[in-house]
Each structure stands twice: as structure tokens, then as C-alpha cells.
Amino acid sequence: MIRDRPPSILTTSFPNAAEEPYTTGQAWYVLQNHIAGGFQIRHEDVTALCNSVQPQSPKDSKLVQKVLLDLKRCNRFILSKELAGVSAKAMARGLLPSGGVDEATPYYKVKCGLFIGNAFLNKNTGLYVSLDTDVLVDTALNTLYSGLDGLRKEDNEKYEEQRKELLAEGRAISKTIFRYLLTRASTPTRNMKKRAKRKYLKCVRCCSGPSPQSIDVLVRICLLEEEELQKGLNAAFYIMNTYGKNAFLGKAMDETFAAVKEAEEKLAAQLQEENQGESDEGDDPEGEKDGEEK
């Protein structure tokens, strides 16, 4: 005889949720008490918690990240590929206005992209072995690129130093995300010991590596740093060359090669202009004037 599955803890705790929706904090409070009793958490409960995140509520986004951290640490919770996508979209929803990316200012786009990117890089959340590459591109990388491009176009000397720091941070996180994606697509268990291998294989739910679309966005993020274009080009060359050596991942887009070539020409023009300026400064106009007077 097959027993009927009992309702989830959130369903029994909030029977009128359709009429009176609960907040993300209320849902987590109920789940915490459930965990304290030694019970496991269902994926549908975590999905319901993520769906309760409201637009433009950073506290809810931070709470979703805390939920992922606590569940993996205390509840032996294994994040599925679908739930990882729901979690990433929930964090993005809480950091952006109700209209989404189109209504957000460049600064908040950058903060959203960096937050989700750092959550992906934090191995304690479980996103690095469960979040699909396409979802990462949609929620973090495209948002980060759009925000950094908007900051680059702004002409505000008051926030010049902050803008440079965010551009440098975007370049650094792009290289790290690329390394994480490449590692999980390249059978990392070959160099692991038995215990680490079992632990990794138990948690891994997604092995998708860097796609041509993700490479295009990552390279373009690196090339946005015009003041330090040489560093951006070095990062872009590292990504392109490493990706090119792994033919099983695919081939970079023609638009990506064109963007790198354009950046090279721009850097060459900058260096030529600097050299020309130094040569002009090397001339001694005062000496020429003295010679004419004699």
C-alpha cells in the first residue's frame, strides 16, 4: 500500500498563502525550526522560499544566499540544477527593480552581477556544481556587462575612483568564473583523492562548461577597462587562448575575435599617442628661442 505524501511544512504553516503571501523571512523562520527538529528540507519548500523574494529587496537576496549556505552545512542538502536556477533568478529579482534589468541603474546592475557571481564562486553555496552556464550568463554576466558599460559611459568625476574599482573587480571576477566553468567541464575528479572525489560526485549536478556566448561576455567585460586596457587585453588573451586549447568546448564567436582585434588597435593607437607626446616634450623650445636671439 502506497501512502499519500504528507504536505510540506510551508503548506501546513501557511494554509492561506494564496490570499496572504508570506515573506522570505517568515518562510526561513519556519524552515529553520523544521531543521532544528532533525527533519530534511524538501526542494519544493526552498523553491517556494525563492519565489517569495520581492523585487528591489536586497535583504531577501542575501537571505537566499544564507539559506543555501546553511542548508548545505547543516542539513546535507544537495542543490539540484533546477533549484540552482530558481535561486539565482530569485537573487537577481531581489537586487533589481520590478521592471528588471531595463529599469535598473548601471550601479545596481553591477552590484547584482557581482553578488550572483560571488555566490557562484562560493563553493559553500553549491552553485558552482549545479548552476547551468546559460542561467549564469543571463542572471550575472549579462547584467554585469550592461552595468559596467553604463558606468564607463558616464562622465561623473565624483565617482571616478569607484568606477575604476568596479571595472577592475569585474575583470578579476570574469577570469575566476571562467576558471571555475572550465574546471567543472574538464573532469576535475581525475586529480582528486578518493574521499574528495566521492564528496564532489555526490554534489555535482551540472557539468556544463564555458559556452561561446559566455566567452563573448567575459571577454567584453575585460575589455571595458579603458584606463588599464593592457590588463584587460591580457585577461582576454588568457580566456581566449585557454578556451581555444579545449576544442571539445566549442569555438569562440567571430564577434569575440573582432572585439579583441579592435581593442588591440585601440591600445596600439594609445601607445603611439603617448610616444608622440613624450617625443614632443623632449624638444627644448627654450633652447631654440635662445639660439634665434643669438
Image (cartoon, rainbow, N blue to C red):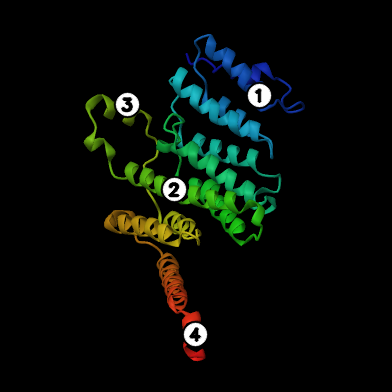
Please report the residue visible at 40 percent of the width from the left and 49 percent of the height from the top: 175
The extreme top residue here reads 37
Q: State the separation of the CA atoms marked 1 and 4.
A: 80 Å
**In this figure, which residue is indicated by the disc labeled 3?**
199
Badge 3 crowding class, 10 Å Cα cut-off, few under 14, some 14 to 19, many 20 or more, is: few
Q: Which mark is residue 290?
A: 4
Sooner in the amino-acid sequence: mark 3 or mark 1: 1
**In this figure, which residue is indicated by the disc labeled 2?**
172
Badge 1 crowding class, 10 Å Cα cut-off, few under 14, some 14 to 19, many 20 or more, is: some
Q: State the separation of the CA atoms marked 3 and 4.
A: 80 Å
Q: Element at badge 1?
A: helix
Badge 4 crowding class, 10 Å Cα cut-off, few under 14, some 14 to 19, many 20 or more, is: few
Badge 2 crowding class, 10 Å Cα cut-off, few under 14, some 14 to 19, many 20 or more, is: some
- Is residue 195 placed above or below 116 in the rendered structure? above
Please report the residue visible at 59 percent of the width from the left and 28 percent of the height from the top: 63
> In front: 228, or 280?
280
Residue type, label 2:
Ala
